Image (spheres, rainbow, N blue to C red):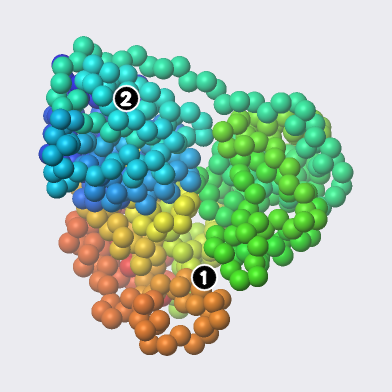
């Protein structure tokens, strides 16, 4: 048995079911091992950022890692942006990165690079395999590291001679420690705060946005009157009828500062203190005002749901409000705007829909419109590195083949990883991609204004414009095997979405805004 086969057999035995791959010469023994081992499905991505982003989406929805198979340092580099996003999402991902044979590295062949330096910033666990006999154990440790709550990125570099060398067999699973419970002292300290009657905001993130945690948070809010918010860009959030209606922390720093200006206590459950996405003149990095006190109830790596339940019990919060009523919004008509586009999705979305939102400036109206829709899962761009939406939706569809997926996608960021459409077509995935085609990087137009440039010149406008030439998303989708159409009114979006979400397989709708 080769080291490669021992590694893949170990992964299969530990419950790994998918390998998102863009392999090259140094990974051929790992590719061959996928033929030898049943249970691990190889899925080809035509760009490494598709593979890493799909592994992120899969991990968010399955709560267990997928593998990526990447070619040397340049291949890993192509996937780094979405590994950055996966790290911010606390997604379990295991990267297998092929490398030159250990005895060949000294020759400095053209594809040689410092993979370790590339991988370290996005990996919580990193190892360069040294021998075929130890490779299976290395793989088991990588899977265990990625799987520890709340989830993380693990990277195992596999020199080709380690992959083809002789191994004795697969390794056994490593035991995983359950997430740490929050001690009673901290629970009681936060309980005193929420019982105080002072203006309080409870901010939820990570596992705090799953259903069980939200229900406990709703009991706390019902008992104390505190406000419930979710982090600005949730990795995965359960929403809709029967669940609490959570407000969303704003994106721009001055809005957060204004919001927290009326708050005396900020309770953090599975999330860090809010900071500005970027540094602006005369704007602080830390957005919590001096007279607002932060209290950490639970870190992301702790049992957030249990901490919220313990807090509810400590304040005798047994009564849970009914949650959002199931309300089907009216079907919008007429002009297509971000507001009518969001209303169109909310009007037709089915129960169980998974929404991956990378709609950027066009997306906020949908979040507001969908609070009372049928129960659904909402995911968003966690790390700010655009190009996450289409791959993440692809991985979510493989994780949950019984559920429809909507990729709500801005046109500019969609171009980063449009190869995802080909993978969706090849695998027959039930993903509907809705392109918000405003034909500009609108967020950059907004940021120009915020930077004191209300009337940009020709060059600045050209660097934010996508209309010369206009991108033909219908042509792109069709060329990549996805049935595609263009719509120009709210009525047409409603009809097209309803049809696409009802039919199996991938679809693309370009909505001209």
Which one is nearer the viewer's eye here, 58 or 139? 139
Residue most toward the top?
168
Can see residue 250? Answer: no
Q: Residue at x 33, y 45 (%)?
A: 118
Q: How many other residues sit within 10 Å of disc 2, few (<14), some (14-19) or many (≥20)?
A: many
SS at mark 2? helix
Which one is nearer the viewer's eye here, 342 or 491? 342
Q: Residue 15: image x %, image y %?
A: 35, 24
Q: Residue at x 65, y 41 (%)?
A: 269
The picture quadrant where one finds residue 313 is top right
Q: Residue at x 19, y 58 (%)?
A: 480
Identify the residue under disc 2. 139
Cα separation between marks 2 and 1: 47 Å
Locate the C terminus by quadrant.
bottom left
Q: Residue at x 61, y 44 (%)?
A: 271
SS at mark 1? helix
Identify the residue under disc 1. 339
Residue most toward the front?
106
Q: Nearer the viewer, mark 2 or mark 1?
A: 2
Q: Residue 492: image x %, image y %?
A: 38, 70
The picture quadrant where one finds residue 399 is top left
Q: Residue 409: image x %, image y %?
A: 39, 61
- Is residue 25 depicted above or below 448 in this figure? above
Which one is nearer the viewer's eye here, 383 or 65? 383
């Amino acid at each position: 048995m080769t080291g490669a086969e021992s590694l893949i057999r170990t992964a299969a035995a530990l419950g790994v079911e998918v390998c998102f791959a863009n392999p090259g010469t140094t990974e051929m023994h790992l590719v061959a091992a996928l033929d030898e081992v049943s249970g691990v499905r190889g899925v080809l991505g035509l760009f490494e950022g598709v593979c890493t982003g799909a592994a992120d989406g899969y991990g968010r929805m399955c709560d267990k890692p997928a593998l990526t198979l990447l070619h040397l340092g340049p291949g890993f580099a192509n996937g780094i942006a979405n590994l950055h996003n996966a790290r911010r999402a606390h997604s379990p991902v295991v990267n297998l990165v092929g490398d030159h044979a250990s005895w060949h590295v000294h020759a400095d062949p053209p594809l040689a690079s410092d993979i370790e330096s590339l991988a370290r910033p996005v990996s919580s666990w990193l190892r360069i395999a040294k021998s075929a006999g130890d490779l299976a154990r290395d793989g088991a440790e990588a899977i265990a590291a990625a799987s520890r709550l709340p989830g993380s990125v693990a990277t195992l570099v596999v020199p080709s001679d380690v992959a083809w060398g002789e191994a004795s067999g697969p390794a056994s699973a490593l035991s995983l420690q359950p997430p740490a419970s929050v001690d009673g002292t901290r629970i009681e300290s936060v309980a005193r705060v929420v019982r105080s009657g002072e203006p309080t905001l409870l901010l939820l993130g990570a596992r705090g946005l799953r259903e069980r945690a939200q229900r406990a948070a709703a009991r706390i809010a019902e008992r104390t009157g505190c406000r419930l918010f979710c982090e600005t860009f949730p990795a995965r959030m359960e929403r809709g009828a029967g669940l609490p209606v959570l407000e969303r922390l704003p994106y721009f720093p001055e809005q957060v500062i204004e919001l927290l200006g009326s708050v005396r206590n900020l309770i953090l459950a599975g999330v860090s203190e809010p900071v500005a996405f970027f540094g602006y003149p005369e704007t602080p990095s830390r957005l919590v005002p001096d007279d607002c006190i932060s209290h950490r109830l639970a870190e992301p790596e702790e049992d957030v749901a249990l901490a919220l339940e313990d807090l509810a019990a400590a304040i005798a919060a047994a009564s849970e409000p009914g949650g959002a009523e199931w309300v089907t919004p009216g079907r919008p008509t007429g002009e297509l705007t971000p507001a009518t586009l969001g209303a169109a999705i909310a009007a037709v979305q089915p129960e169980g829909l998974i929404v991956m939102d990378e709609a950027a400036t066009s997306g906020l109206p949908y979040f507001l419109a969908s609070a009372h829709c049928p129960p659904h899962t909402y995911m968003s761009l966690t790390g700010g590195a655009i190009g996450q939406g289409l791959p993440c939706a692809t991985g979510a569809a493989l994780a949950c083949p019984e559920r429809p997926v909507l990729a709500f996608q801005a046109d500019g960021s969609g171009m980063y990883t449009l190869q995802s459409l080909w993978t969706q077509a090849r695998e027959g995935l039930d993903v509907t991609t809705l392109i918000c085609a405003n034909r500009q990087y609108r967020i950059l137009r907004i940021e120009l204004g915020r930077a004191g440039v209300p009337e940009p010149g020709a060059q600045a406008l050209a660097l934010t414009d996508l209309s010369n030439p206009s991108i033909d998303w219908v042509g792109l989708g069709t060329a990549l095997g996805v049935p595609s159409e263009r719509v120009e009114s709210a009525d047409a979006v409603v009809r097209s979405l309803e049809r696409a979400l009802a039919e199996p397989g991938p679809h693309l709708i370009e909505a001209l805004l």
